[in-house]
Image (cartoon, grey):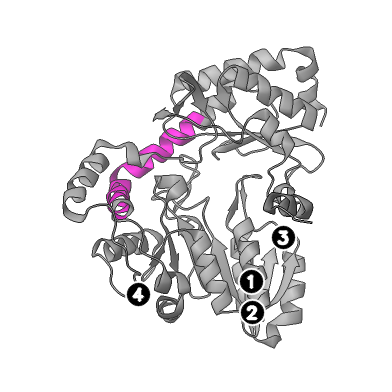
Amino acid sequence: MKTSLAKHLTQRNLFEVLGYNDAVREVGLMGQTFESLQGRELSIQQQTWLDFVSMNYLHLQTLPAVHQQIIQDLSTWGISYTAPASYIKPSLLPEVEALLAQLVGAEETVLFSSTSHIVNSILPLLAAECTLLADEHAYFITKEATEIARYRGASLHTYRHNDLDHLESLLKEHAHTGLCIVLTDTFYPSESRFAPLPEIMSLLETYDAFLYLDDAHAFGLFGASPDEAQPLGYGGGGAITYFGLKLDRVLYAAGLSKPFGVPISFLTGPKRTLDYVRTLAPHLKHSSTPSLLHLSAAKSILTENTTHGDAMRQALLENIQRFRTLNPDIPFKSPVHTPFQTIHLSEEHARAIARQLQERHILVVFQEEPYDFSKGAALRFVFSSLHTHAQIDQLSQALHEIFAQDQYRSALHAI
C-alpha cells in the first residue's frame, strides 16, 4: 500500500508537535495572507486589520534615513552576492559584524542568516565527548540542534525550567566528564521573564562549564543600566548588557529580525571559539552570505539605533503602559514593561474571544495549552513602538465590549 507524505506526517503527529492544531487554524491565526502593510495595519482581502501579532518591536526600518541608505546601496551592491563567506565576502559584512560587536560589548561577532543556522552549526561541531544541559523550555530550534548533537555523540540532559537546583545537580553529576554546555533562552516571552542568568553564570564558574544563550527576544529590546524611567535599559545590547555579563564562558546568539526587522543573526563568544566556527561551521562553508540588501539594511538600522533606538524603546514602553492603564480590570500575567501582554483563560473562552476580536479586524496571538498555562489557553497582545494611541484605544474598546458580556466577565477571574 502506498503511503503519502502527508499521511506519514499525520501518523507521526508532527503537526501537533509543531503546534499546527485545528484550534489555531479555526481561530484563523494561521494561514492569513495580507496584501499590504502600513505601520501596524494590514490589508487582508482589501480590509484594514490591526496587527497585535508581529514581533517587530521597534520599527527602525521605517525611518526615512534607512530607506534612503538602502536605495543608495542598491546602486553600489545590488541585491545579493552568491558565495559562502568563508571564501569571499562583501565589505558590508564585516562592517555589520563590527557594529554588532560594539553594541553587545564583544571583541567580534560572526554573521549567519538565522539563529537556526547558528545553533545547527555550533552544537554538532562541539558534540563529541560533550555534555549538553538544556532548559526544558529552550526554543524549539535549540532542542532540535541538541538532538542532532546527540546523534553526533553528545550526552543530552534536560533540566526543569529555570530550576537552578536541578541544573546544579546535573552539573555536579556531569561536569567532570569533559566539556559541559548549558543551553537556555535569555528571555522567555510567553512568561515575560528572564532566565536567572547571573546565577547560571555563577554555576558555570563553580563547575567549569559553558553557556549557549539564545537572545532572540531580548536583543535590541533590552539594554544596559535599566532604571525606573526605562526598565528596558538603554542601547538595545540585549541580555549581555542588561545583566553586565562577561562572554568568556558564553556562546551568545541573537538576531535582528524581531527588534530591527532584518533577517540576520550573529554569534559571539571567546575569540578562539569564533575562529574555530569561521573555519568549520558548515553553514559558513556551504551557504551564501545574507543578502546585500539585508546587510545594507542592518548597517543603516544599527547606525540609526545609536541615535533613535532609545526613543523608540521609550515609545514602546509608553504604548504598553497606555494599554495597561486603559485595562485595569484585566489580570495580565506579564510585567508592565514587556511587549508581550498575556491573559490566561479557558481554551473555550480564549478561542471565542479571539474570534470576536477577529470579527472586529484585530489580530492577536492565540495559544492552546501553552507551557506557561497548560490547563487552558493564552491570548497574547504584542506591542511595538509603531502602534498609535488610536490603535491601542481601539483594541482596548473591543476588550471592554467583549468582557462586558456576562460569560466573559466571569471568565477573567475563573482561572
SS state under label 3: loop
Q: Position of residue 11 (x, y in %)?
A: 78, 52
Rounded to the nearest angstrom, the CA distance separating label 4 from label 2 is 24 Å
Lateral position of residue 111 relative to residue 405, left or right: left
The amino acid beneath tag 2 is Arg
Between 7 and 393, which is closer to the camera in this rendering?
A: 7
| Residue at 78% across, 32% down | 347
Image height of 173 relative to 402, above or below = below
At label 3, the amino acid type is Glu
Mark nearer the viewer, 2 or 3: 2
Q: Distance between the residues labelled 2 and 1?
A: 6 Å
Q: Which residue is drawn at 71% across and 76% down?
A: 171
Q: Earlier in the sequence, mark 1 or mark 4?
A: 4
User: Where is mark 2, residue-wise?
Assistant: 152
| Kind of residue indicated by mark 4 | Ser
Task: Rate crowding at label 1 as few (under 14), some (14 to 19) or many (20 or more) other CA atoms within 10 Å.
Answer: some
In the rendered image, which residue does mark 1 sit on? 148
Point out residue 179 in the picture as x, y percentages from the top left corner.
62, 83
Point out the image quarter for the N terminus.
bottom right
Part of the protein shown in magenta: 295-319
Q: Pick whichever, 76 or 307, lies toward us.
A: 76
- Mark 4 or mark 2, which has the lower sequence index? 4
